[in-house]
Each structure stands twice: as structure tokens, then as C-alpha cells.
Amino acid sequence: MNIDDYCQKKAAPAGSSTYYALWRAPLTAQPLLTALYALHRELSESVSEVSDPTVGRIKLAWWQNEFVALAREAPTHPVTQVIARHYGNTAPIGTFMTWLSGYQMDLDQTRYLDFVGLHRYVEQVGAALANIVAGITAHEPTNLKSWAPVLGRALLLADIVERTGENARCGRIYIPTEEMQRFGVTATDIQHCRYSKGYIQLMSFQVSRARRMLNEGLGAMPATERKLQRVLRAQAAMSLALLHELEIEDYRVLCQRIALTPLRKLWIAWRIC
């Protein structure tokens, strides 16, 4: 397997949302965008697929050293080698370090007291990703801060809602404790798949916030950027469709995964113009 195939398999296996979103990117930008999503996936798996936080810290430390090597144009990992091919010595190391800091939070805490705390996490993980992805094809890179971070935060919040049960089984509950208490839902309820009226209200609140932020991000995107940002727009469209499905299914995501079919993802991505 060559390094481009490795990135494709890691970031966007056939049938995944990322696969169909990247399909809408300009051909010249697809290899780099795929590598960036692959890197993000590598960092995520460094903490999500380990049960011992110490092992996760060792993996993140390895990536930190790899970013230093990337800055020196001597990367060793397939993903960073592809990134080096396109960026050379201008790779956005600062953004990669921000991602590291975000995933470090997953090792340092498994709960968030309020949305202010969660916002810091989605800023470092979601907003940073959207900002760098948008910058690859942006017409006006200097204006990204007015819309890309909002969209990135919203995409991650939608993903957190969708993966509530999966995350809980890994010991992490991203829904702020203050909001759970407001609706009378406990961490034990989440972990033991207890569906209640309070749970429905809690998840409705989460979905409404994610949907509002997705629409805010899309609405703030300048008209001159729309055709150039089909990747993020496709992701947002799929997230909005999935949030609707979660509502139809009464947010029963604690013991199962609700997902769009590959055909529906293809249709949604294809319609982005």
C-alpha cells in the first residue's frame, strides 16, 4: 500500500461520510485534504482506542515528535509524508499542535462541567480542522475566521450527539454535566442506556444547538466561497440529515448507532452545487 492509499483508507474508507465529502473537493486538492483528515483520524485513535491514558500520552508524544520532524522536512509516517509533499516547509505545525492539545483533553478529563468547558474542546479539535480544510481551497483565506470555526465546532457537536453511546462506552461523556442536571439525566443513565422523558429533552436540546450552529456556519459562508467549500458543505448537509434521523428515532443512540446509508450520503453530497 502506498502512502496515498494509506491516507485514503485511514481518512475516508468507501461508504463513509468523509469519503463522499472529499469526492466533492477539486481533484488537485483531494490528496492533501485526504491526508489532513487522515492525520486527524490518527490523533483521534491515539486516545480513543486505548484504555490506559499513559499509552495515549505516549502516542501523542510520538506525534509531537513527528510534527517536529515534519517541520524539518524529515517525516517518517505515511500521513505526514503526504502532507510534506504538498506543504514542504510551510506545513501548519501550529494547527497540528492545537489538535494534540485538544486530544490531550480526552486523556485529562472524561466529563465537562458546562458548555464553556466543552467549547474549548470543540474549538481545538473541530474548529481547527475546519479552518485548515477551508484554507486549502479558500478564495479569501483571510476571512475564514468569520465562518469556518463556527462550522467546525458545529460539525463536532453533531458528531458528539451521534456518538453519545459509543463515547460513553469508552468512559467519556461530552454532554455538559450542568445540562444533564437541568434535564434530570445522570451519567449512569447514559452509561446504562436509560431512555426517559428527561433524556429526550436533553438530546433535543443538544440537537437543536448543533443544528443552529451548523446553519449559522453555512449562513456566514460568503457566496464567493460556496463552490470552493463543497467538502465542508457536504459534511454539514450530511450532519443536518443525520440530526433529523436522530429526532425521528427519539435519539436512541445509547445502545446503537444511527447512521445514513451510503446511497443517501452520495445523494446528499452530489446535490451540493
Image: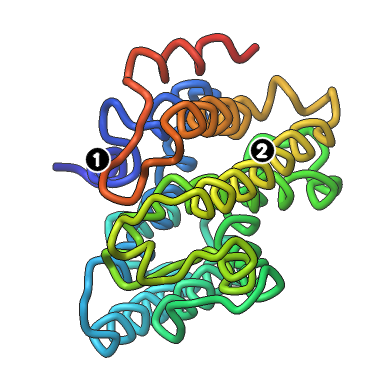
Query: Can the viewer see residue 93 in this picture?
Result: no
Give the left or right position of residue 20, taking residue 175 as reference. Answer: left
According to the picture, the residue beneath numbered tag 1 turns out to be 9
Give percent across and percent down for residue 20: 42, 24
Under mark 1, the amino acid is Lys
Q: Nearer the viewer, residue 144 or 234?
A: 234
Residue at (45, 80) in percent of width and height = 104
Which of the image's four quarters has the N terminus?
top left
Give percent across and percent down for residue 201: 58, 48
**Disc on the earlier residue, 2 or 1:** 1
Q: Is residue 145 above or below residue 208?
A: below
Give percent across and percent down for residue 8: 30, 38
Give the colouring mode of the picture.
rainbow
Under mark 2, the amino acid is Arg
Q: Nearer the viewer, residue 56 or 242?
A: 242
**Residue farthest along the bottom direction in this orientation:** 54
- Count residues near mark 2 (Cα–Cα under 10 Å), then give few for <14, some for 14-19, many for 20+: many
Q: Is residue 134 above or below residue 245?
A: below
According to the picture, the residue beneath numbered tag 2 turns out to be 211
Give the left or right position of residue 75, taking residue 251 as reference. Answer: left
The quadrant where residue 240 appears: top right
Residue at mark 2 to residue at mark 1: CA–CA distance: 29 Å
